[in-house]
Image (cartoon, rainbow, N blue to C red):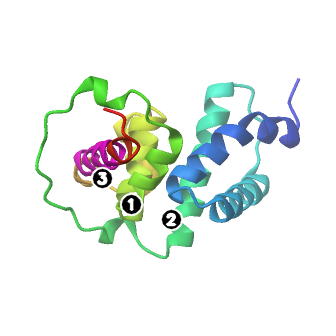
Amino acid sequence: MPRTFEELAGDQMDALYQGALFLSCGDAGTAEDLVVDTVMLAFQEHAAESDPERTRRWFEARLVRAFLRRSERSVQSAPVAAVERTKLDPDAFEGLGSDDLFEAASILPPGPRAALWLVLLRRWGHHDAARVLGVDDAKLQRLLEYRDLLMKRLLTDSHLRKRARGIS
């Protein structure tokens, strides 16, 4: 039995909002606007889908497209930063919250932020993510190089906040 659009969208709201918070660097107002844009776009294109995984990806693709439209920047124009590769301590991620991630994302241009959200956080395959972003696989690889910059910022900021609170 086909599910209604409201049921499909309702199942995705929490994940879409978390994704919108990452893409908007934690700005709740912008995240809410992105989710509304996404749902409106999805409603216009809605086709009943019975596979929950395909439905999730369908909504995520529309979230990324709404974000990139709002950012008024093209994924194609995002410069690739030279980032020093650092060895990451796995224990450094203990105690990091979503606000830390959202804040760290603020240093990334929109294209790399969208690519990292799809591939690293939502576990999309490279080819599918490249298709949604409108880039080829080589360009996606360059966008994903921002991962090191994100991790460095995330860990540096977290470490500084812990030191300021007297936590080692």
Distance, label 3 to label 1, CA atoms, is 13 Å
Which three-letter amino acid code belongs to the residue tagged 1?
Gly
Which three-letter amino acid code belongs to the residue tagged 2?
Leu
Secondary structure predominantly adopted by residues drawn in magenta: helix
Which three-letter amino acid code belongs to the residue tagged 3?
Asp
Could you tell which of marks 2 and 1 lies nearer the N-terminus? 2
Residue occupied by mark 3: 136
Residue occupied by mark 1: 111
User: Is residue 79 something that shows in the picture?
Assistant: yes
Could you tell which of marks 2 and 3 lies nearer the N-terminus? 2
Question: Residue 55 versus residue 164: which sits nearer the camera?
Answer: 164
The answer to which image quadrant residue 18 occupies is top right
Query: Decide: marks 2, 1 in contact (CB < 8 A)?
Result: yes
Query: Residue 68, which numbered label?
Result: 2
Q: Position of residue 124 (x, y in %)?
A: 44, 35
Q: Position of residue 67 (x, y in %)?
A: 55, 62
Could you tell which of marks 3 and 1 lies nearer the N-terminus? 1
Label 3 neighbour load within 10 Å: few <14, some 14-19, many 20+: some
Q: Image check: 4 left or right of 150?
A: right
Closest to the camera, between mark 2 and mark 3, is 2
Q: Does 106 appear above or below 147?
A: below
Q: Which residue is drawn at 36% across and 64% down?
A: 109
Q: Image check: 23 left or right of 38?
A: left
* Magenta span includes 63: no
Outermost bottom residue = 72
Distance, label 2 to label 3, CA atoms, is 17 Å
